[in-house]
Image (cartoon, rainbow, N blue to C red):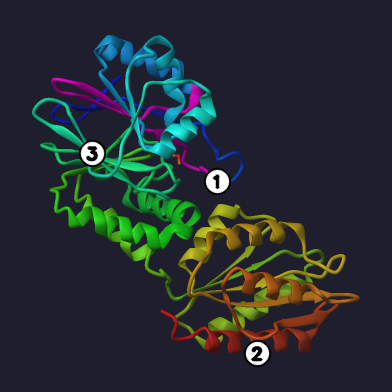
């Protein structure tokens, strides 16, 4: 079923209510997602993006019902990742001559995934494609979020087809931003930015500025996941500019894993010390072995600093933290502070390992951390409390 977006532009994508893990196991989709595809039915008919591979057949069957495959003149592949290009396999099996407009890297990734010699038409920024009285303008958008990404802009209707940018993993039968719960929407938006776009923040800012320097009117942003921004689309652009600019709130996040609760007790007392020294700061604790990793990353993104703890195990740290630290390193957070802590029974290397990881990840590491032998007694708990107060002071003035 197609859904009218504006004038002759229709949504023809797929809402995936079931999805709970995306990118393999790398991204949790608590609220499902959608793969948004659009049909522009002018004198010429253009299909923008498609859906994930498992939904390819039903996608093409729907296109057949809605318009007929013979009517599709152009395919615009804004990005080659299979959640947007999967439906093209079935479509181009049946209509192999339809030209596929994409960037040079888009052609490379599509060939790499599907090993098909489709009718590629490689575009560069500024290239246009006439659909009759309206035209599509292409703008390469490398690293938003892959090297092959591009934006397509439809004149007349003033619609930006932004692919992954400005999207969010949210399944909703109400496809428009003004029809959904705003808190749920922005919760998913910031999680998406934090977990996917953070390392590309300098490019996000630059690309947004470049696009808006064209001074094109903008009525709608049609993303490839989640809602269509038809009401005040500039609001999500403004959010991206904020998030791309070293975003942080007055929050400190304490993250730990624990074997026999000693490190947990340390973390809780550190958090109490932070709260006592700075009642304005929001402090949250997460056990990395029990909390969704993408939700922790979102909390880190919002925080001005983090405090990370692990007991010493085999002269290292617990494995739930190792995986999380690898994610943190890859995301290239900027302008955030870190401190470390951990319990131990014998050798006590965990704080050194954690400290080196945080420094390598680009955090401003405060001190050498605090370690406590065996189960923290009253004196040890008090030391953690005092350490928390020092952290509050060291992390102050950061927002
Ligand atoms: Fe939604 Fe980068 O694919």
Range covered by the magenta-colored residues: 27-54
Count residues near mark 1 (Cα–Cα under 10 Å), then give few for <14, some for 14-19, many for 20+: some
Quadrant location, the C terminus? bottom left
SS assignment at label 3: loop
Query: Quarter-wise, where is residue 97 in the image?
Result: top left
SS assignment at label 2: helix
Q: Nearer the viewer, residue 173 or 334?
A: 334
Residue at the spot 65% in from the left edge and 89% down from the top edge: 386
Distance between the Cα atoms at labels 1 and 2?
Answer: 36 Å
The CB of the residue at mark 2 lies under 8 Å from ligand 1: no
Lateral position of residue 353 relative to residue 29, left or right: right
Judging by the rendered image, the residue that carries numbered circle 3 is 127
Residue at the spot 43% in from the left edge and 22% down from the top edge: 87
Q: Earlier in the sequence, mark 3 or mark 1?
A: 1
Q: Nearer the viewer, residue 342 or 276?
A: 342
**Would residue 163 be seen by someone viewing this image from the given angle?**
no
Instruction: Answer above or below: position of 328 versus 227.
Output: below
**Would residue 190 be seen by someone viewing this image from the given angle?**
yes
User: Looking at the image, is mark 2 or mark 3 nearer the viewer?
Assistant: 3
Distance between the Cα atoms at labels 2 and 3?
Answer: 61 Å
Q: Position of residue 73 (x, y in %)?
A: 25, 18
Q: Earlier in the sequence, mark 1 or mark 2?
A: 1
Residue at the spot 35% in from the left edge and 36% down from the top edge: 78
Q: Earlier in the sequence, mark 2 or mark 3?
A: 3
Label pair 2/3, CB-CB below 8 angstroms: no
Judging by the rendered image, the residue that carries numbered circle 2 is 386
Q: Is residue 115 rendered magenta in the image?
A: no
Judging by the rendered image, the residue that carries numbered circle 1 is 27
The residue sitting at the left extreme is 133
Count residues near mark 2 (Cα–Cα under 10 Å), then give few for <14, some for 14-19, many for 20+: some
Q: Is residue 29 rendered magenta in the image?
A: yes
Query: Quarter-wise, where is residue 234 in the image?
Result: bottom left
């Amino acid at each position: 079923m197609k859904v009218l977006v504006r004038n002759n532009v229709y949504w023809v994508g797929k809402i995936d209510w079931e999805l709970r893990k995306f990118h393999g196991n790398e991204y949790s989709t608590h609220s499902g997602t959608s793969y948004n595809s659009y049909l522009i039915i002018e004198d010429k008919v253009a299909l923008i993006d498609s859906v994930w591979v498992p939904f390819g057949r039903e996608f093409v069957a729907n296109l057949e019902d809605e318009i007929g495959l013979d009517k599709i003149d152009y395919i615009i592949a804004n990005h080659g990742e299979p959640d947007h290009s999967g439906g093209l396999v079935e479509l181009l099996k049946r209509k192999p001559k339809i030209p596929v407009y994409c960037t040079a890297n888009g052609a490379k990734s599509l060939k790499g995934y599907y090993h098909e010699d489709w009718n590629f038409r490689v575009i560069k920024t500024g290239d246009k494609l006439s659909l009759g009285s309206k035209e599509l303008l292409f703008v390469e958008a490398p690293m938003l979020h892959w090297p092959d990404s591009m934006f397509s802009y439809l004149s007349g209707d003033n619609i930006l087809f932004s692919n992954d940018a400005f999207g969010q993993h949210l399944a909703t039968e109400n496809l428009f931003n003004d029809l959904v719960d705003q808190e749920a929407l922005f919760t998913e938006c910031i999680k998406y930015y934090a977990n996917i776009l953070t390392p590309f923040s300098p490019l996000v800012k630059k690309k947004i500025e470049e696009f808006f320097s064209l001074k094109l009117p903008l009525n709608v942003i049609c993303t490839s996941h989640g809602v269509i921004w038809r009401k005040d689309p500039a609001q999500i652009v403004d959010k991206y500019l904020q998030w791309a600019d070293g975003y942080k709130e007055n929050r400190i996040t304490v993250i730990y894993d624990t074997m026999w609760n000693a490190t947990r007790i340390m973390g809780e007392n550190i958090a109490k010390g932070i709260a006592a020294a700075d009642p304005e700061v929001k402090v949250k604790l997460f056990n990395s072995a029990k909390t969704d990793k993408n939700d922790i990353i979102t909390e880190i993104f919002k925080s001005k600093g983090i405090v990370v703890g692990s007991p010493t195990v085999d002269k290292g740290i617990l494995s739930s933290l190792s995986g999380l630290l690898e994610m943190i390193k890859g995301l290239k957070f900027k302008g955030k502070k870190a401190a470390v802590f951990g319990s131990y029974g014998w050798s006590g290397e965990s704080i050194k390992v954690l400290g080196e990881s945080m420094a390598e990840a680009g955090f401003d590491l405060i001190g050498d951390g605090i370690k406590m032998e065996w189960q923290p007694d009253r004196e040890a708990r008090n030391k953690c409390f005092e350490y928390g107060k020092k952290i509050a002071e060291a992390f102050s003035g950061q927002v």
